[in-house]
Amino acid sequence: MIDSAPPQSQQAERALLGSIAVLPEMLDEVLPVVDAANFYIESHRTVFRAFKSLHDAGEPIDVVVVAKELEKRGQLEEVGGALFLIELMGEMPHGAHADYYAKLVRETADRRQLLLACSDGIRMSQDAEASVEETTGVIESRLHQILGRAAGRESVSIRETMQELLVNMDREDGDRLPTGFTDLDAMLSGGLSEGQLVIVAARPGMGKSAFAGNISLRMARAGSSMLFVSLEMSAAELAARFASTLSSVPCAAITARNLSSNQKSDLYNAGNSLTELRIQIDDAPQRTISQISALARMQKRRGGLDALVVDYLQLVAPTNGQLARDQQVSAMSRGLKCLAKDLQIPVICLAQLNRAIEMRENKRPRLSDLRESGAIEQDADIVMFLDRPSTYDTQADDRKASVILSKGPTGTVELSWNPLTMTFTDRNHGSAF
């Protein structure tokens, strides 16, 4: 069905590889945009995989190390030997243009995928046994995947959702980072520490995302720079929740755009406050740990980063789909822990609980309820469970919630829950956010 050569740009591919060879730190800039599969030339894919492998292992990227890595894999001669690597560096006009070359490589890759999708659509349309509904469904799905990959390649700031980010505010190194919840911070000896992996787990519907959003908002209002990787909700949904929390305007009213004049005024004031906060949101539907790490390193380098939130672990895309699920999750949790240590920031990662808790009379969560719990429990410095008894006990107060700390410091913190604004507050220290 395709008569001519598919869209490609060998020059852009070589320029991108050369940029990384000259300035290895540019790999963090391009990983959210491009991966090995986007290269048309097989030898280019091989070299890019070697770059990424060395990068993930914390090894330097230079001609000698890359050549040794390729030789170890038996691929050095396949790509043209060490001479090919030297040529890449020699013909590179400017390493700082890597992001531009990455976009060119990704665009041609997307065009190839679009061409294949159209070709498959034509083939299915000519197949009398394929229904119109099936054909249009396949085409729509393929186009959605292509558009999804093309969009959301870089994180979106609150200021870009409501306006622009403010300048970084310095925080003394070594200080703990308060969550903003008084009793929780007291139990954490003042807050979260640099290099910690913090798991926040709960059953569906407990408000994990709302709790993580509340912590992010509290930290940002205290001057911290946040990166919120949302694998489920869009940046607009998160911004609406933040605005609801600050304005006390119900989330449902914001979503339905059914607001009184007073609510509109309160919402605009909250929106103006949000534009002053340093919250960066990445809402791409699928991210690998390597891509999340690249985003975090990029923000750390560009404007500072005090904490990372990942919502949630089980939605992170596996790097190797051939591995068993427990091995995939183990690699993810280990990757997040390494990232926390590398960037010296707390990483707050949400996680789902397994179905075992549904079968018990006592619904209070425990460590064994974590899905693929072995690796998560091992890697986490702190594990806290979010619990709202009213979700399984109709007689319970629907405004009562608690945080159960089960690893690190242990104990229970009582919170209040406002379902209208998706907001948690200290139960024993007033209701104001």
Image (cartoon, grey):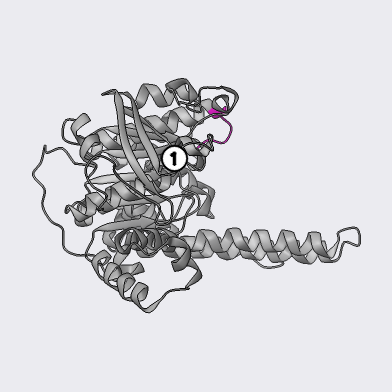
Residue closest to the far left: 172
Q: Position of residue 258 (x, y in %)?
A: 47, 73
Q: Nearer the viewer, residue 280 or 43?
A: 280
Q: Nearer the viewer, residue 196 or 220?
A: 220
Q: Which secondary structure is most common in the magenta stretch?
A: loop
Q: Position of residue 391 (x, y in %)?
A: 51, 39
* Above or below 242: residue 275: below
Q: Quadrant of residue 95?
A: bottom left
The answer to whether residue 234 is left or right of residue 264 is: right
Count of numbered marks:
1
Residue 320 is one of the magenta-drawn residues: yes
* Above or below 72: residue 145: below
Q: Quadrant of residue 245?
A: bottom left
* Above or below 335: residue 7: below
Q: Please say whether residue 66 is visible from this viewpoint.
A: no
- Mark 1 surroundings within 10 Å by alpha-carbon count, few (fewer than 14), some (14 through 19), many (20 or more): some
Q: Position of residue 428 (x, y in %)?
A: 24, 39
Q: Secondary structure at mark 1?
A: loop
Residue closest to the far bottom: 261
Q: Position of residue 133 (x, y in %)?
A: 81, 63
Q: Please say whether residue 216 is visible from this viewpoint.
A: yes
* Above or below 308: residue 380: above
Residue on which the image places disc 1: 397
Residue 10 is one of the magenta-drawn residues: no
Amino acid type at mark 1: Asp
Q: Magenta segment, which residues?
A: 319-325
Residue closest to the far front: 395
Residue sitting at 72 percent across and 67 percent down?
3
The quadrant the N terminus occupies is bottom right
The answer to whether residue 238 is left or right of residue 40 is: left
